[in-house]
Amino acid sequence: MAAEPPTELESAIETVVTTFFTFAGREGRKGSLSTNEFKELVTQQLPHLLKVGRGL
């Protein structure tokens, strides 16, 4: 039996988790984001969110 493709939500969550782990741990703790890692993630991956004025 062929596996069903992931749902849109499952794919989105996988993307969020993969992106998190791409940025997490660069400065030490692998399972969390430092302030600098968080800023880098938001700046690179959510640039439009910042432009709208909903700054973090």
Image (spheres, rainbow, N blue to C red):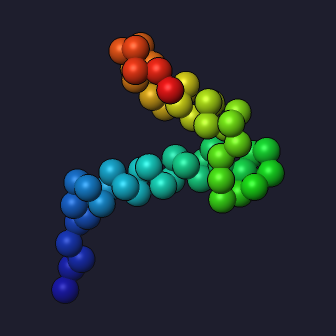
The x and y percentages for residue 53 are 40, 14
The x and y percentages for residue 22 are 60, 48
Q: Which residue is drawn at 70% across and 33% down?
A: 36
Question: Camera-side residue: 10 or 54?
Answer: 54
The x and y percentages for residue 33 are 65, 46
Q: Quadrant of residue 6?
A: bottom left
Left or right: 41 with respect to 35? left
Is 25 above or below relative to 54? Answer: below
Q: Residue at x 55, y 25 (%)?
A: 43
Is 43 above or below relative to 8? Answer: above
Left or right: 15 with respect to 56? left
Q: How many marks?
A: 0
Q: In which quarter of the image is residue 38?
A: top right
Q: Which residue is drawn at 57% across and 35% down?
A: 41
Question: Camera-side residue: 56 or 41?
Answer: 56
Question: Camera-side residue: 3 or 10?
Answer: 10
Q: Which residue is drawn at 62% across and 30% down?
A: 40
Figure quadrant of the N terminus: bottom left
Which residue is farthest bottom? 1
Question: Camera-side residue: 6 or 41?
Answer: 41
Is 32 above or below relative to 27? Answer: below
